[in-house]
Amino acid sequence: MLKLNKIKAVYSDVVLALTEVSMLVEEGSIVALLGSNGSGKSTTLKSISGLLKTEDGKLTEGTIEFDGKRIDKLNPEKIAKLGICHVLQGRSAFQQLTTEENLQMGAYLRRDKDNVKRDLDQIYEYFPQLATLRHQKGGYLSGGEQQMLIIGRAFMARPKTMLLDEPSLGLAPGIIGSIFAILKKINEVEKTSLLIAEQNAIATLNIANYGYILQNGRVILEGSAQVLKNHEHAQGIYLGLNSVPPRL
Amino acid sequence: MKRRGRTKTDYSQDMALIGSTQQWVILAIFLALLVILPHVLSWTHNLNWLTFINFTAITIIAVMGLNIITGMAGQVSLGHAAFIMVGGYTLAILTSNAHWPFWVALIISAIITAVIGFIVAVPAIRLKGFYLAVVTLAFFFIAQYIIRSLGITGGIHGIIGIPYPVVGGIKINTDINWYYLLLPVAIICIIFSANLSRSRTGRAFLAIRDNATAAASLGINVPLTKLRAFFIGTLFAGLAGGLWASYVSVVRLDQFTIWDSIWYLGMIIIGGGGSTAGVVMGVIFLRLISQILHVISTADWMPYLSSSIMVSLNYGVYGLVIVLFISLQPYGLISVWRKIKLNYKRWPFGT
């Protein structure tokens, strides 16, 4: 279980990115993290995975707990070791490594070689497209394929919780659908908890159990996926479901 | 359609350094040629080429070290000549002052260089790109200053008369003997380096070069991995420096210049960064050009020109070749080789 307790995040000691963000990702659940550009979704994920520290940012208030253990002071590699894998935004495949080598990198911390091999086959079953691109360099894959690759790479780490930063970024609608379907499947079969930061609210809420909506670094609305989908305010302003422009 | 060339069908084939019987045969023939090479050169009275080959072997070892730091792990270092210098001086002191046996001194000087490389890297790896390059450049001048100031290193006069190594009762004092000493050492280093890029550690180097943030998110300790790259890379530098000092039996400050550091980077770029085979090609290619230019400019049929004009002309042509090569083949010699292989496999269908 991942628990954020009123965290405040600052970049370069001056730029305030998050205030009083509290969040809960229960084991085996899918949680949506929604909000417009610059609302603090990526910063929230980076705070959890520890990557905030590598970008001159830090948490000045609040705590983050994972399975009852405080992780907010740990380095990224320690947090990864505990079972949190951050799937970065955009095309973060290792460009010069092949698909298979990229996937192998996901299992960097694992020593159980036989299971790694089985998981590799599992990935190729989830994403048959990747199997045909085994020996292709990561940099030559299309945007959608790279997204599949980095989700697969994260899967190879066998994390308890996966943090996904805009998995739909720059992808065609059909591919978005299949990626979300696989995410749902991974969640159901492997019992991996997912925290998905997304712009594509409908697709995300369709698979999520719970959701948070961020604005200017604060949680302004939270609730079950069903409630958020039907919430008038949320629908209009943040989810873009209304055909009529919302009153401001 | 029957596929030409070799098609990998499983992961173990992908991991194997040498895949097929055919490749083993080619390799065996190539090694046999390398073994008889000095005799061929001595029959044809071309022994000065052997000096060139020996220096090339040492340079290959040195540049493979830089390739681990810069090509694989992506950390630009301009201090590589300084690490070679440290290795050379350490070996000189250990063999001519302390009278240690050659192999022990060589291994210890490589390890000492690697420890120094590690220590230098501790503050340096906090920086990236140009900033890191400048810090390693600063290390070069600091190392030069320290060696010039110390008494044990002989100041500006250096250390002369480094004893020739004795291996199995044979004194290694001729170019042919040196060739048979350097060849196995270089081959071991090449195998080590080629294997490294497939190992867990080597993959971590490539990962932090391609995307350090993503690497960290997968549990790779990025600072520690960079330190490892510097340690292994400078270990090669120390080894090359020790061999060099012992081969020329003298170390002096002017043997290790900042230009060497820059040329080593150039060799990596020409060869194709990150690839061991590419680096070997890059070193041979650049050294061969400069050697050919040297042979031409000193040939009998060349009209007499003053030596300063000759030197400038050499550098000019050398630079021109490199500029042309990089603009036509920006991914280096290794990419040319890969294209040839791919075309062979797909012939006659083109792309």
Image: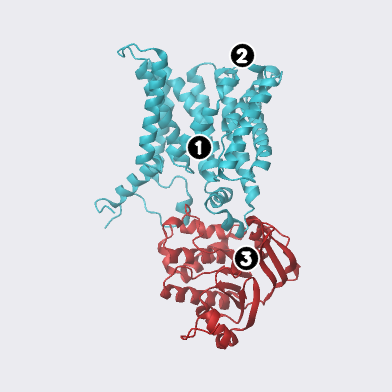
Determine the chain carrying the residue at label 3: A
Element carrying mark 3: helix
Q: Residue furthest left?
A: B348
* Marking on residue B236: none
- Asked whether, in this view, residue A224 is left or right of residue B311, the answer is right
| Quadrant (top left, top right, bottom left, bottom right) of the C terminus of chain B | bottom left
Q: Residue at x 63, y 58 (%)?
A: B219
Where does residue A197 sit, x and y in percent of width and height?
57, 72
Task: Judge whether B32 appears above or below A162 on screen.
Answer: above
- Asked whether, in this view, residue A60 is left or right of residue B132, the answer is right
Question: Counting other residues with Cα less than 10 Å from the Cα at mark 2, is it few (<14), some (14-19), or many (20 or more)?
Answer: few
Element carrying mark 1: helix
Q: Nearer the viewer, residue A83 or A13?
A: A13
* Marking on residue B161: 2
Name the residue carrying label 3. Answer: A43
| Quadrant (top left, top right, bottom left, bottom right) of the N terminus of chain B | bottom left
Task: Judge whether B111 appears above or below A57 on screen.
Answer: above
Task: Judge whether A192 appears above or below A100 on screen.
Answer: below
Q: Answer yes or no: do the residues labelled 1 and 3 have beta carbons within 8 Å?
A: no
Q: Are marks 3 and 2 on the same chain?
A: no
Tag nearer the camera, 1 or 2: 2
* Structural distance between the alpha carbons of marks 1 and 3: 44 Å
Q: Nearer the viewer, residue B123 or B205?
A: B123
Name the residue carrying label 1. Answer: B190
- Asked whether, in this view, residue A200 is left or right of residue B8, the answer is right
